[in-house]
Image (spheres, grey):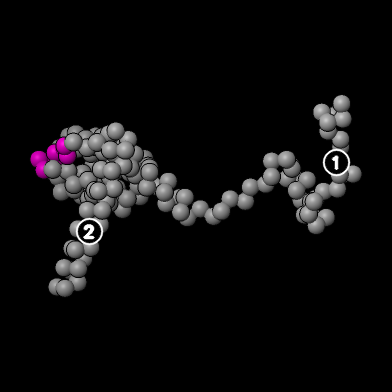
Amino acid sequence: MLAEKMEDVQHSYEKSLFLQDLHQFMDSKHLSIERIPQLGFQELDLFRLYKIVQQLGGYDVVTAGQKWKQVYTMLGAHPHSTSAATSTRRHYEKLLLRFDLHLREQKRAMTAPPSLKRPRHCSPSEQDEDSLRGGKRSTVDRPPNPALTQ
């Protein structure tokens, strides 16, 4: 019983932070969410919608697999609606997709290894030659720069 209560508190806290971040993000893009739409005669739970889509593999997987009707049903809405899949997808695209992409980009930036860019002045083969020689290239090996010799 205590574990259930702790889980509910954690869920409420996570939902609160998510919605706060979502609203801040949308406001920063001048796309504020003024009114939460109805879906299946109940107010759409944006946090739950986001979590369900992520659980099913994310927006791209849900869309490619035509799982929007399943998302609608998992939200607890009436499963016999003829426009369920389309309306669920449109609500996600309008209210959550930009934020979803933003979160993915943040996650990618946090987990990406530091880039190992090569200097622009060397081709890959020149850089390999440099490392074999122990670093800097000798000026004798380089062809003269015609712009400097004129």
* Image disc number at residue 13: 2
At 11% across and 43% down in the image, what residue appears? 42
Quarter holding the C terminus is top right
Mark 2 or 1, nearer chain start: 2
In the image, taking residue 59 as reference, residue 117 lies left or right, namely right
Residue 65 at x, y percent in the picture: 34, 42
Per the image, is 98 magenta? no
User: For the magenta stretch, what is the residue range?
Assistant: 35-42
- Specify the quadrant of the image occupied by residue 79: top left
Work out whether residue 69 or residue 55 is closer to the camera in this orientation and state it: 55
Work out whether residue 130 or residue 38 is closer to the camera in this orientation and state it: 130
Residue 115 at x, y percent in the picture: 58, 50
Is 115 above or below relative to 3? above
Q: In the rendered structure, which amino acid carries the disc numbered 1?
A: Arg
Q: In the rendered structure, which amino acid carries the disc numbered 2?
A: Tyr
At 24% across and 36% down in the image, what residue appears? 32
Is 144 above or below relative to 7? above
In the structure shown, which secondary structural element does the residue marked by tag 1 occupy? loop
Residue 1 at x, y percent in the picture: 14, 73
At 63% across and 47% down in the image, what residue appears? 117
Residue at the extreme left of the image, as rendered? 41
In the structure shown, which secondary structural element does the residue marked by tag 2 occupy? helix
- Specify the quadrant of the image occupied by residue 44: top left
Q: Would you say residue 73 is visible in this rendering?
A: no
Residue marked by disc 1: 142
